Image (cartoon, rainbow, N blue to C red):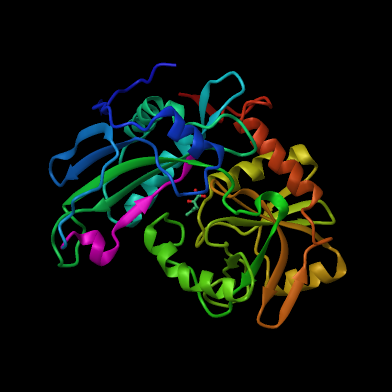
């Protein structure tokens, strides 16, 4: 594979960790804790556009204390993974979908767009220079890629910044939840709202995650692993769990997930909807109420619930708690369809199942 466009210049340093250090990290990479030896950066200024595309050593930023991002959170990010196949080759999964979502998020936050060719070129060059950091296929181990851009102009008046920095870092990861696919419990908050119509719910911006942290603490205080948000208006309809989209499997063979608008348009969400029919499930996007969950878990018409995201892959939801309810989903163990969809998705990503949809891209 040869990239159509080369935008990023390689500034390769000898600032690399030893094979022994890397092997120790790759044996048990805990999500989000370690980073590879390099990063990609570029700078945008109003009038001149993007410049200084570089893949160089990972190093701290020096930012002015007045940088707009530090005050008004003008920032967007992405998450995607590189997977090593059994033959040693390395592949990206639906990276073009991430490029497009990054552009949509940027528009919503009044940030400049990075075009798809530059987005992909930066990723491919970083993954190539840090190729030894892509873990061998083992469980769900992969190299998590985190593209982001933020307002660096030193100005504390409120308007879109005229200087913006793009950066891409990479982190070898295992499963997001230490419990892995054994299943997690969600806390359905009636206290906090993640997004309202017209807000930034569909954008992947840091502010959405900052606003969800208090809710996540409340989830932990209630012995749950994550929060599940409901809509801002009626406080009834499921939205998303903050780091994952949510899916319900019914006894009638439907795979139901909330429609878009105030939730993240997850790449994994879209992939799961596309795979549903291979599993005898009818994909449906419609609203699901907390009342529906309570009734469906009680009478058995809801058989499985799971959550999906790049970081979390497909994570079974085995329990749902709220202020006045405590539901066990199905048998309280990961559901059959959930695990089959999870295996199917991982098999495609790791090259063990045919990529009939053209989702993979070799680095
Ligand atoms: C992802 O699944 O890639 C995400 O961005 C969720 C996260 C913030 C860890």
The mark tally for this picture is: 0
Q: Position of residue 41 (x, y in %)?
A: 26, 39
Residue in front for this viewpoint, 92 or 280: 92
Please state if 306 lies on the left or on the right of 68 as rendered: right
Magenta-span inclusion, residue 62: no
Within the image, what quadrant is residue 323 found in? bottom right
Q: Residue furthest right?
A: 299
Instruction: Give the residue drawn at x 70%, y 36%.
Output: 344
**Can residue 199 be spotted in the picture?**
no
Residue in front for this viewpoint, 254 or 129: 129
Please state if 2 lies on the left or on the right of 174 as rendered: left
Magenta segment, which residues?
A: 66-81
The N terminus lies in quadrant:
top left
Q: Position of residue 172 (x, y in %)?
A: 48, 39
Please state if 314 lies on the left or on the right of 84 as rendered: right
Q: Position of residue 246 (x, y in %)?
A: 63, 57
Q: Position of residue 52 (x, y in %)?
A: 18, 34
Instruction: Give the residue drawn at x 47%, y 73%.
Output: 214
Magenta-span inclusion, residue 76: yes
Within the image, what quadrant is residue 170 found in? top left
Q: Residue furthest front?
A: 20
**Can residue 115 be spotted in the picture?**
yes
Instruction: Give the residue drawn at x 19%, y 67%.
Output: 158
Instruction: Give the residue drawn at x 52%, y 72%.
Output: 217
The C terminus lies in quadrant:
top left
Residue in front for this viewpoint, 355 or 132: 132
């Amino acid at each position: 594979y040869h990239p159509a466009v080369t935008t990023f210049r390689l500034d390769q340093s000898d600032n690399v960790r030893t094979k022994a250090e890397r092997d120790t990290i790759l044996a048990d990479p805990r999500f989000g804790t370690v980073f590879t030896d390099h990063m990609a950066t570029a700078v945008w200024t109003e009038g001149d556009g993007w410049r200084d595309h570089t893949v160089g050593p990972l190093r701290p930023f020096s930012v002015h204390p007045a940088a707009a991002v530090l005050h008004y959170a003008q920032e967007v990010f992405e998450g995607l993974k590189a997977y090593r196949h059994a033959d040693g080759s390395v592949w990206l999964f639906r990276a073009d979908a991430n490029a497009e979502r990054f552009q949509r998020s940027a528009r919503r936050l009044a940030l400049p767009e990075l075009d798809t060719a530059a987005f992909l070129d930066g990723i491919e060059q970083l993954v190539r220079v840090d190729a030894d950091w892509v873990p061998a296929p083992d469980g769900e181990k992969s190299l998590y890629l985190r593209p982001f851009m933020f307002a660096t102009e030193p100005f504390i008046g409120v308007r879109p910044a005229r200087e913006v920095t793009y950066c891409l870092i990479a982190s070898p990861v295992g499963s997001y939840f230490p419990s892995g696919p054994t299943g997690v419990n969600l806390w359905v908050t009636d206290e906090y709202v993640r997004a309202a119509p017209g807000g930034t719910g569909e954008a992947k911006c840091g502010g959405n995650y900052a606003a969800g942290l208090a809710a996540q603490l409340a989830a932990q205080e209630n012995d749950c692993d994550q929060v599940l948000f409901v809509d801002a208006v009626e406080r009834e309809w499921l939205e998303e769990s903050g780091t994952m989209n949510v899916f319900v499997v019914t006894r009638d063979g439907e795979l139901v997930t909330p429609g878009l608008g105030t939730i993240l348009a997850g790449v994994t969400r879209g992939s799961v909807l596309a795979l549903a029919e291979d599993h005898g499930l009818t994909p449906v996007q419609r609203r699901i109420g907390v009342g529906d969950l309570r009734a469906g878990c009680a009478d058995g018409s809801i058989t499985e619930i799971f959550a999906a995201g790049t970081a979390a892959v497909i994570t079974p939801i085995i329990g749902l708690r709220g202020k006045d309810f405590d539901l066990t989903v199905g048998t309280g163990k990961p559901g059959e369809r959930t695990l089959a969809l999870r295996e199917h998705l991982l098999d495609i990503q790791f090259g063990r199942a045919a990529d009939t949809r053209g989702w993979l891209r070799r680095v």
